[in-house]
């Protein structure tokens, strides 16, 4: 079995603090998700109903456990002072044998368009390739999510594929394609 790397619980960028999930942040997570629900519903299967504080706390307990076991590495995106939750990012679809993972992200609607998702994705890309020894990092998104699709291109990712009819819309009504971007070492 491959030894799992030491993963920092917190990352700092020039404007952001990325932190491991903590159940104490349940109220902040519920507020952030609910404030962005109309925008998240278009792209995120998990965001189809308002989030209660209890549901957020349970979600965070599970996310913290998975982080500690290196199953998924979710980080919450906070402002530099850690007083406002701006969104979420992290690695999922981890395969430590390669090693590789996929970066996902979302930003609270009122803070969208300010470069926070790009800054967080850059921090995770650097962590993965420079410190964690990843050989492959992916970002996947729906081609219709133009904001999300601009980020990997801006960070030097290559477009590997367009997977046709790869997913369904969160409402289950239509088939959707998936763009697969990667950086490799």
Image: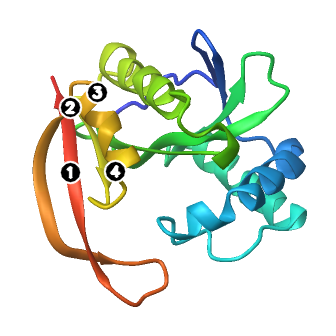
Between residues 143 and 13, which one lies in front from this camera angle?
143
The type of colouring in the image is rainbow
Q: Quadrant of residue 41?
A: bottom right
Which label sits on residue 146?
Answer: 4
Which SS class for mark 1? strand
Q: Considering the image in quadrants, where does the N terminus appear?
A: top left
Q: Quadrant of the C terminus?
A: top left
* Horizontal relation, residue 166 to residue 23: left or right: left
Helix, strand or loop for disc 2: loop
Which residue position is annotated with label 1?
180
CA gap, disc 3 and disc 2: 7 Å
- Which residue lies under the disc numbered 2? 157
Crowd rating for badge 2 (residues with CA inside 10 Å; few <14, some 14–19, many 20+) = some
Residue shown at the point (13%, 59%) measured from the top left:
162
Looking at the rendered structure, the secondary structure element under dot 3 is helix
- In the image, 154: left or right of 116? left
Query: Spatial distance from mark 1 to mark 3, Cα to Cα?
Result: 14 Å
């Amino acid at each position: 079995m491959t030894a799992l790397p030491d993963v920092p619980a917190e990352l700092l960028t020039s404007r952001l603090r990325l932190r491991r999930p903590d159940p104490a942040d349940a109220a902040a997570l519920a507020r952030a998700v609910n404030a962005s629900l109309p925008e998240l519903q278009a792209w995120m299967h998990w965001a189809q109903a308002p989030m209660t504080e209890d549901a957020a706390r349970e979600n965070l307990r599970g996310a913290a456990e998975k982080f500690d076991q290196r199953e998924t590495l979710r980080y919450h995106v906070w402002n530099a002072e850690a007083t406002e939750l701006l969104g979420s990012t992290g690695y999922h679809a981890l395969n430590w044998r390669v090693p590789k993972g996929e970066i996902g992200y979302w930003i609270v609607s009122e803070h969208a368009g300010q470069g926070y998702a790009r800054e967080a994705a850059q921090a995770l890309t650097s962590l993965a390739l420079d410190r964690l020894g990843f050989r492959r990092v992916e970002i996947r998104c729906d081609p219709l999510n133009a904001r999300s699709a601009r980020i990997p291109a801006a960070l030097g990712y290559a477009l590997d594929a367009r997977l046709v009819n790869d997913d369904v819309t969160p409402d289950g009504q239509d088939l959707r394609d998936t763009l697969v971007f990667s950086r490799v070492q």
